[in-house]
């Protein structure tokens, strides 16, 4: 795939995302590229994936549900919360709208919100870049993730991220997806 001709993707995103989400997508792309460089992965591919990871984010819930129906690995947490609809829908959209066939890109888009057990390093960097880009994420969220990344690598940063997510959900009396708990526990066991 040619990652050098990004203008058509950027133009599509500008037309289909609000300005804040587009700014976030640019930040995620930059962060993903930096993480890819740090961990020896394809920087251009990471930038591209970060750029389009939220391609479905601003679609109406009805359209997202229609796209999600084409995804065969949905979990309860995703179907119960409209905030997570865009990840599986986005993977389908990327395949249909942009003709992306690269399984690594599609999987990283697919799992960038909830994550999954045993993510690849590429999936981890897209997941983390989404949470720690500096265009729209506040320093109090980004700083602990950067520190964890420096001290203990991708898995340590993921552990901090999941720990913060769980705390936030508990504080707001919101449902915690069992996938989130399973990933957190597995990270704890492995570190």
Image (spheres, rainbow, N blue to C red):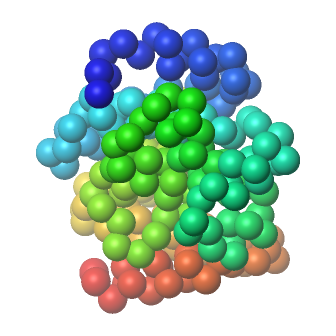
**Where, by quadrant of the figure, is residue 4 drawn?**
top left
Locate residue 168, reporting x and y percent: 68, 68
Q: Does residue 163 appear to the left or right of 118 in the view shown?
A: right
Q: Nearer the viewer, residue 28 or 59?
A: 59
Q: Nearer the viewer, residue 82 or 8?
A: 8
Locate residue 65, reporting x and y percent: 77, 53
The structure residue drawn at horizontal position 44% and vertical position 86%, both measured from the top left corner, is 185
Res 138 visible: no
**Where, by quadrant of the figure, is residue 84 drawn?**
bottom right
Image height check: is 117 above or below 137?
Answer: below
Q: Does residue 175 appear to the left or right of 29 in the view shown?
A: right
> What count of labels does the image hold?
0
The structure residue drawn at horizontal position 37% and vertical position 55%, both measured from the top left corner, is 123
Q: Does residue 58 appear to the left or right of 100 in the view shown?
A: right
Res 190 visible: yes
Q: Nearer the viewer, residue 183 or 45?
A: 45
Q: Does residue 147 appear to the left or right of 22 in the view shown?
A: left
The structure residue drawn at horizontal position 29% and vertical position 27%, both measured from the top left corner, is 1
């Amino acid at each position: 795939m040619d990652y050098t001709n990004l203008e058509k993707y950027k133009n599509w995103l500008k037309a289909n995302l609000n300005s804040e989400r587009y700014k976030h997508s640019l930040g995620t792309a930059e962060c993903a590229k930096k993480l890819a460089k740090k961990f020896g992965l394809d920087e251009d591919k990471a930038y591209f994936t970060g750029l389009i990871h939220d391609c479905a984010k601003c679609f109406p819930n009805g359209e997202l549900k229609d796209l999600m129906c084409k995804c065969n690995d949905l979990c309860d947490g995703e179907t119960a919360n409209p905030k997570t609809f865009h990840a599986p829908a986005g993977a389908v959209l990327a395949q249909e709208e942009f003709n992306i066939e690269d399984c690594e890109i599609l999987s990283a888009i697919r799992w960038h919100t909830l994550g999954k057990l045993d993510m690849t390093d590429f999936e981890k960097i897209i997941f983390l870049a989404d949470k720690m880009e500096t265009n729209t994420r506040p320093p109090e969220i980004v700083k602990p993730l950067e520190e964890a990344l420096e001290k203990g690598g991708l898995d340590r940063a993921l552990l901090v991220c999941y720990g913060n997510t769980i705390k936030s959900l508990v504080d707001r009396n919101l449902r915690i997806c069992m996938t989130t708990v399973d990933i957190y526990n597995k990270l704890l066991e492995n570190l």
